[in-house]
């Protein structure tokens, strides 16, 4: 469902501290600056805040705004109720005596996964979605909606950063043609959803957009994929198949090994996926716009702004774009979206 824009000048925000006991503490009126980010390549969203440090009846406010304290950032448009857009805990805290302020950084619960290291071994046939469930349970992170990935993967040992393990499982699933998924946190629970599966789709045009850019690059292009037999360190394996895409931008080759797949059919599928994903110029787009607090990383939106868009009957039309990153200035009510063209 394409959503018409509400009155962008009447968006309200609320930042609330959630003490272990007692009533929630609304610190909205104490905020001097607040930035919220969901960035591509990072499992965890974060909030950066600078606020006044005032004295209350029960002491200074900084006693309640400290490491490990939980908080919720909410937003609403005119006539609506507040809805949560971020839930997390404080990981970095600083007071500044000269101007009686507090600066802190909060991350959602996925941060601990992003920072942790561990060994994980997944047997043959375990999907990316099941792997994510295993990791979340092992790390003690509550699970939310897990839509996938669902393709069966080959057995493999992973060690080191747990966030990288999740990223690798997502990429391996994508190579098998299982689509593009985003891992993020919603209401404190880890979720893995297919990109562009949001039911409410917002449309952005030059009428409300405040600038942007449109970059096209062929630097990471792959136009030919060779599939070899078994991977070998001491001799060159035989070529099993060669897949060729569009070579109008030149011949750039990638290689796959059948031994990394269950059968030749899966290897062919992976080669075709590579050509589909990297066989054309990469597109990165950015748009500045009054904040729509409910736009998230992984969402699809419709855009017709600058050179971003299509043409029909001599008029610019909106195209679907996937949101790769969101950065919002809560005080100014401005968001910057990094987009991947969904062509």
Image (tube, grey):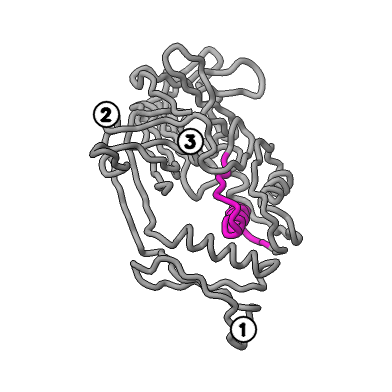
User: Pointer 2: what residue?
Assistant: 207
35 versus 221 height, above or below: above
Q: Which mark is residue 199?
A: none
Q: Nearer the viewer, residue 277 or 157?
A: 277
Q: Which residues are magenta?
A: 158-184
Q: Earlier in the sequence, mark 3 or mark 2?
A: 2
Q: Earlier in the sequence, mark 1 or mark 2?
A: 2
User: Pointer 3: what residue?
Assistant: 296
Q: Is residue 318 left or right of residue 267?
A: left
Q: Nearer the viewer, residue 311 or 1?
A: 311
User: Pointer 1: what residue?
Assistant: 233
Which residue is depicted at the point 65% across and 70% down?
264
Measured Cα–Cα span from mark 3 to mark 2: 21 Å
Tag in front: 3 or 2? 2
Q: Is residue 312 left or right of residue 77?
A: left
Q: Report x, y in % for residue 91.
A: 54, 39
Measured Cα–Cα span from mark 1 to mark 2: 58 Å
Assign a secondary structure to mark 3: loop
Q: Report x, y in % for residue 312.
A: 29, 39
Q: Is residue 316 left or right of residue 47?
A: left
Q: Is residue 284 left or right of residue 55?
A: left
């Amino acid at each position: 469902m394409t959503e018409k824009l509400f009155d962008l000048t009447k968006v309200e925000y609320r930042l609330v501290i959630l003490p272990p006991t007692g009533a929630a503490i609304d610190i909205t009126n104490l905020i001097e600056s607040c930035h919220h980010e969901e960035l591509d390549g990072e499992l965890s969203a974060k909030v950066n805040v600078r606020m006044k440090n005032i004295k209350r009846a029960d002491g200074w406010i900084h006693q309640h705004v400290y490491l490990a304290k939980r908080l919720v950032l909410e937003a609403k448009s005119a006539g609506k109720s507040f809805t949560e857009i971020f839930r997390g805990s404080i990981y970095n805290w600083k007071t500044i005596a000269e101007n009686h302020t507090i600066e802190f950084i909060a991350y959602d619960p996925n941060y601990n996964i992003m920072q942790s290291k561990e060994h994980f071994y997944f047997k043959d046939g375990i999907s990316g979605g099941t792997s994510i469930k295993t990791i979340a349970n092992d790390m003690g992170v509550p699970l939310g909606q897990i839509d996938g990935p669902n393709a069966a993967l080959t057995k493999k040992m992973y060690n080191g950063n747990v966030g990288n393990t999740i990223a690798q499982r997502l990429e391996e699933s994508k190579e098998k043609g299982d689509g593009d998924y985003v891992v993020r946190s919603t209401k404190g629970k880890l979720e893995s959803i297919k990109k562009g599966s949001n039911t409410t789709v917002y449309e952005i045009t030059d009428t409300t957009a405040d600038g942007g850019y449109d970059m096209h690059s062929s630097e990471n292009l792959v136009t030919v994929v060779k599939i070899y037999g078994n991977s070998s360190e001491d001799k060159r394996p035989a070529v099993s198949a060669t897949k060729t895409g569009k070579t109008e931008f030149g011949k750039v080759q990638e290689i796959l090994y059948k031994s990394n797949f269950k059968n030749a059919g899966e290897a062919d599928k992976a080669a075709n996926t590579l050509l589909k994903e990297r066989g054309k110029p990469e597109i990165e787009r950015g748009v500045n716009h009054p904040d729509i607090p409910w736009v998230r990383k992984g969402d699809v939106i419709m855009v017709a702004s600058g050179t971003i868009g299509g043409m029909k009957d001599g008029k610019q039309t909106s195209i679907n774009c996937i949101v790769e990153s969101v950065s919002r200035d809560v005080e100014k009510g401005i968001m910057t979206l990094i987009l991947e063209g969904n062509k």
